[in-house]
Amino acid sequence: MRDMLLVVDVQPSFTPPDWLVTGIRALAKRMPSVATVERHDESCTPFARQLGWHPAPDDESLVAADRVFIKYGYLPPREMIDYLIAQQPARVLVCGMQTETCVLGAGFMLFDAGLSPTLVTDLTVGSSLDRSGELGATLWRHHFRQLTAVAQLDSQS
């Protein structure tokens, strides 16, 4: 069994910092990876109506991944979860944008599917509520317990 990387919503609409994109790109080269891209379709998710904002309808991932899954809303699509289940990873390393919302939502779906979600704490950024990502990491630790950092992954190689 091996680790797989899930890159959550690292796309132009969310203006990820350069250090995040660079770090995730380097990690994605080391293992099988999947990415989500959140796109806007008001008929699927009422972002504009309820929040007055929405991601672009045609964003692309800023990280090259083995598979990219398009989503409309906070949660990853079921097809991505099914794909990960079929790969039988030892754990799914999760990184990306909006630690306390989209990243955490992915964690819940992974957990409920019987996978082992592990947050890569130094490759995640929170929403405008908490750009540090600490709130999301605290919630992740409470719900899933498994956190790591790039240095820990490097020492395991």
Image (spheres, helix red, strand yellow):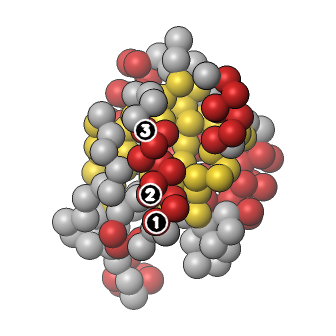
Looking at the rendered structure, which numbered label has been put on residue 62?
none
- Determine crowd level at label 1: few under 14, some 14-19, many 20+ residues with C-alpha closer than 10 A: few
Tag 1 or tag 3, which sits nearer the N-term?
1
Looking at the image, residue 7 sits to the left or right of residue 93; the answer is: left
* Location of mark 2 (residue): 21
Q: Residue furthest top?
A: 1
Q: Looking at the image, which residue is at 57% across and 19% down? A: 90
Q: Secondary structure at mark 2?
A: helix
Tag 2 or tag 3, which sits nearer the N-term?
2
Q: Nearer the viewer, residue 40 or 91?
A: 91
> Circles 3 and 1: CB distance less than 8 Å?
no
For badge 2, the amino acid type reads: Val
Q: Looking at the image, which residue is at 71% across and 34% down? A: 152
> Circles 1 and 2: CB distance less than 8 Å?
yes
Residue 60 image point, x, y percent = 25, 59
Q: Looking at the image, which residue is at 19% across and 66% down? A: 58
- Determine crowd level at label 3: few under 14, some 14-19, many 20+ residues with C-alpha closer than 10 A: many
Quarter of the figure with residue 51: bottom left
Quadrant in the picture for the C terminus: top right
Residue 94 image point, x, y percent = 55, 43
Q: Secondary structure at mark 3?
A: helix
Residue 135 image point, x, y percent = 74, 64
For badge 1, the amino acid type reads: Asp
For the question of whether residue 146 can be seen, the reply is yes
* Location of mark 1 (residue): 18
Residue 26 image point, x, y percent = 45, 43
